[in-house]
Each structure stands twice: as structure tokens, then as C-alpha cells.
């Protein structure tokens, strides 16, 4: 969920009279390592795969097979991690062995898989389409739930020779999980339990200031984007990396600007933000997305419902046979679901999370016991291991027994 504020921040170098992207060479230290290389650099054994979805998208899938604490071995329980909007798999790794959840899971003896959904920097291929073709970008997180996560599950279970896995999602990853569980309920049989960290479903109580400005105009925005053929959200990669050096580095006097952009997304928590990660974060995020993903969330904010993409009156009649898009039937989600949420999350509001919980037949909810915990603290908070990850691991261990 880093994209809109970070894109606005792209204007900062021009305002300050700093060199723009074509005039600024990114230092080697600020270039992003691949997910595989990140894990290997941290001392873990890793593998990279590509999986093809039923509708032809080619997705990057990363695997951490072991470490010194838990060498690779057959029969390890499988965990699949699904990232959020404009994010990618390295977010589970670059906080390091003590805070990076993928590395923690590996040390605890799990076979860890990290998905990259369609359109992000590691999943920009298709069997027929190129990313320059607007048709490539005709998706929201609905298609990620219907196609991407099922393909990842099938592939991870095939390679690991397991029958079931644990699924952990953050933000949009939770949106896609609940889409899959309702639209393709047969995949619930392949999941031991789902752990949803700040899942973005009901959004009408979101206090994110930028989304609240945009949401009332979602129909107009959709019309304009369709009219001008703008289908990909694509801020300049080199410019974002330049900002990582100029604005977000530990030594930069402008770091408070970077910090407050992050606070604008998910909530203010000055005490728990890991400032040393900021310059790394902007090397990977925003990782790419379709504009439809944003429009779909804006539609949820105005409707107050968790429902399918609104194509407009005529489009809905053609697609769904009704005027309004249908709701996702959350009563179909029968597998165990553990929902984690923060009191200070301004993107996925606590009251919206509680509304989700009330509609699920087999769920438990956990409010992080720290009043300032925000949306992005689930990935990069200083104490996320204590308040969230350790509890998730404890629950997984119960299922192993």
C-alpha cells in the first residue's frame, strides 16, 4: 500500500532542485537484490521458480528450503506467504533473521514459499501478452484470488510432496485469500489454517486520508483511467531508488519526510518504526500493480461491502447478470482463520476487521496488544516478532502436533 503517497513524493527532488533520474546513477549498495540473493546473503538456502496460472500469467515463486538452524529436509510443513498491494516477496526477508518472517519460519523448521502476484516486479510475464499491452493489466485482486494463489498452492504442494500447507497473508494478500476461499472453496481442503495480517476486506471505515479523498470519485476515476488507457500504476523505478538515497537513508536529513509518508499510509507509530529499513523498502516498493486494484478498494470504501469489481451498470449486467456486483459469500470460509489487527491501523480499520470476523464461521481474532500498532508494523515493526510472529508460530506448532 505504499504507492500513492510514494508517487506523490516523486515530485520532491524537482522541488528541492535535486538531480532527476536520468542524471543520477544509483549506487550499487542501493540496488535491490533478488529475493533469492537476499535469502542466500542472510545465510539461507533458496530456490526460485515460475508458475503459470490458468489464465496465462507467469508468476515468480520463491522458496527457502533451510538454514544452519534447520537444514533442508523432506517432509517439512509448508508455509505460503502472500504479500500486500504494491509489495513483493522480499518484504518477508529483508528485515533479517530476527524479524523477517520467512527467515524465522525457516529457522523453525518450515518449508517456506513466498508468492509474487501478477503485475509486481517478479511476475510481469504472460504466455501471450506483454506488460505494454493494456489487456495484460485487466485485473484486480479478484483474479489473484481466483488464479494466482491457487496456482501457487498447487505448485508448492507438488514440489514439496505435501498435501496441505499453512497460508499467511498481509493486507491485499488477505483480500485475495478470501476471494479464493469463496470463489474456489475446494482450495480450502489444501490449507491447514490461514493467518490473515490486517486483511483488507471491508474498507468503509478506513481513515487513510488519500483513499478517503479518492473513494467518493471512484466511478469517475475508473472512467478516466479507461478513457486514457492508463492500466498500470508505474512510478519510475529509478526515481524511487533515487529517493531511497536522498530521502530515506539513515544519514539523510530528509528522513523524517520518508517516515511521515509511511505514517500517512498505515498509521503513526514513531516508536516502533524500524527507520534503518526505510532505504531498503524503497528499493522494492512500490513493486507494481494494476490501476484496477486501487479502484476496486475505492469501490469497497464507498459501498461498505466486500464484493466483486464494479464494472458499471452495463458492464455488471454483462458480467454478473445484475445491476450491482455480488458480495463475496464469507459464510463459505469453513477452514480455520486467524485474523490479526492493530488499533492504530488507519488503512484497515479495527471496526472493519471486526465486521469481517463476525461474518466468518470458523475464525479467531487477535488485537495486537500495543495501542500504536499500524498497518505496516505487521512487516517492519521493531517488535512484530514478539507481538505477532511468535504467536503465529505457536499456533502452527500446535497443528504440527
Image (cartoon, rainbow, N blue to C red):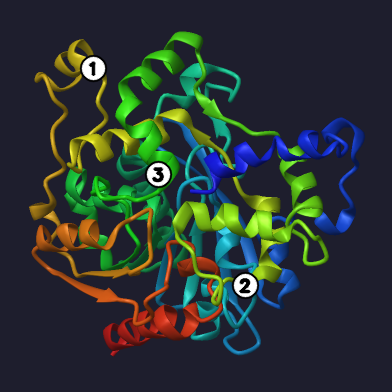
Q: Which residue is mark 3?
A: 148
Residue at 53% of width from left, 30% of height from top?
126
Of mark 1 and mark 3, the one earlier in the sequence is 3
Residue 39 shows in this picture: no
Query: In the structure shown, which secondary structural element does the residue marked by tag 3 occupy?
Result: helix
Foreground mark, 1 or 3, reads 1
Query: In the structure shown, which secondary structural element does the residue marked by tag 2 occupy?
Result: loop
Q: Mark 1 to mark 2: distance in Å? A: 42 Å
Q: Which residue is mark 2?
A: 274
Quadrant location of the C terminus?
A: bottom left
Is 112 displayed left or right of 238 in the figure? left
Number of other residues with Cα within 10 Å of mark 3, as a class: few under 14, some 14 to 19, many 20 or more: many
What percent of the width, then of the height, locates residue 311? 26, 20
Query: Residue 372 is drawn in which quadrant?
Result: bottom left
In the image, residue 175 above or below residue 321: below
What percent of the width, then of the height, locates residue 121? 61, 42
Q: Which residue is mark 1?
A: 312
Number of other residues with Cα within 10 Å of mark 1, as a class: few under 14, some 14 to 19, many 20 or more: some
Is 206 displayed left or right of 35 in the figure? left
Depth order, front residue of 5/239: 5
Residue 232 shows in this picture: yes
Number of other residues with Cα within 10 Å of mark 2, as a class: few under 14, some 14 to 19, many 20 or more: some
Residue at 51% of width from left, 60% of height from top?
114
Depth order, front residue of 165/239: 239
Amino acid at each position: 500500500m505504499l504507492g500513492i503517497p510514494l508517487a506523490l513524493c516523486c515530485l520532491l527532488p524537482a522541488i528541492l532542485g535535486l538531480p532527476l533520474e536520468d542524471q543520477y546513477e544509483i549506487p550499487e549498495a542501493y540496488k535491490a537484490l533478488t529475493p533469492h540473493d537476499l535469502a542466500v546473503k542472510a545465510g539461507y538456502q533458496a530456490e526460485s521458480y515460475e508458475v503459470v496460472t490458468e489464465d496465462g500469467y507467469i508468476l515468480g515463486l520463491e522458496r527457502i528450503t533451510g538454514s544452519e538452524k534447520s537444514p533442508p529436509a523432506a517432509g517439512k510443513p509448508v508455509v505460503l506467504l502472500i504479500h500486500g498491494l504494491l509489495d513483493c516477496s522480499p518484504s518477508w526477508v529483508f528485515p533479517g533473521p530476527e524479524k523477517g518472517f520467512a527467515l524465522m519460519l525457516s529457522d523453525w523448521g518450515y518449508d517456506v514459499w513466498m508468492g509474487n502476484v501478477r503485475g509486481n516486479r517478479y511476475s510481469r510475464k504472460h504466455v501471450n501478452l506483454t506488460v505494454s499491452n493494456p489487456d495484460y493489466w485487466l485485473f484486480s485482486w479478484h483474479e489473484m484470488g481466483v488464479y494466482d494463489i491457487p496456482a501457487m498452492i498447487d505448485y508448492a504442494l507438488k514440489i514439496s510432496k505435501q498435501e496441505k500447507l499453512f497460508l499467511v497473508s498481509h493486507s491485499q494478500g488477505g483480500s485475495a485469500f478470501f476471494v479464493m476461499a469463496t470463489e474456489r472453496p475446494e482450495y480450502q481442503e489444501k490449507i491447514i489454517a490461514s493467518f490473515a495480517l490486517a486483511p483488507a476486506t471491508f474498507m468503509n471505515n478506513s481513515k487513510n486520508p488519500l483513499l478517503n479523498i479518492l473513494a467518493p470519485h471512484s466511478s469517475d476515476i475508473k472512467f478516466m483511467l479507461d478513457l486514457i488507457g492508463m492500466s498500470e500504476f508505474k512510478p519510475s523505478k529509478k526515481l524511487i531508488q533515487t529517493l531511497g538515497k536522498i530521502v530515506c537513508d539513515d544519514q539523510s536529513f530528509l528522513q523524517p519526510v520518508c517516515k511521515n509518508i509511511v505514517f500517512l499510509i498505515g498509521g503513526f507509530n514513531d516508536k516502533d518504526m524500524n527507520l534503518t529499513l526505510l532505504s531498503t523498502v524503497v528499493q522494492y516498493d512500490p513493486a507494481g500493480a494494476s490501476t484496477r486494484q486501487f479502484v476496486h478498494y475505492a469501490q469497497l470504501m464507498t459501498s461498505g461491502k466486500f464484493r466483486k469489481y464494479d464494472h458499471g451498470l452495463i458492464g455488471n449486467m454483462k458480467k454478473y447478470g445484475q445491476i450491482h456486483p455480488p458480495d463475496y459469500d464469507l459464510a463459505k470460509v469453513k477452514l480455520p482463520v486467524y485474523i490479526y489487527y492493530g488499533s492504530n491501523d488507519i488503512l484497515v480499520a479495527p471496526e472493519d476487521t471486526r465486521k469481517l470476523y463476525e461474518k466468518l464461521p470458523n475464525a479467531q481474532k487477535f488485537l495486537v496488544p500495543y495501542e500504536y500498532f499500524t498497518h505496516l508494523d505487521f512487516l517492519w515493526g521493531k517488535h512484530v516478532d514478539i507481538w505477532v510472529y511468535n504467536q503465529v508460530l505457536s499456533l502452527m506448532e500446535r497443528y504440527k502436533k
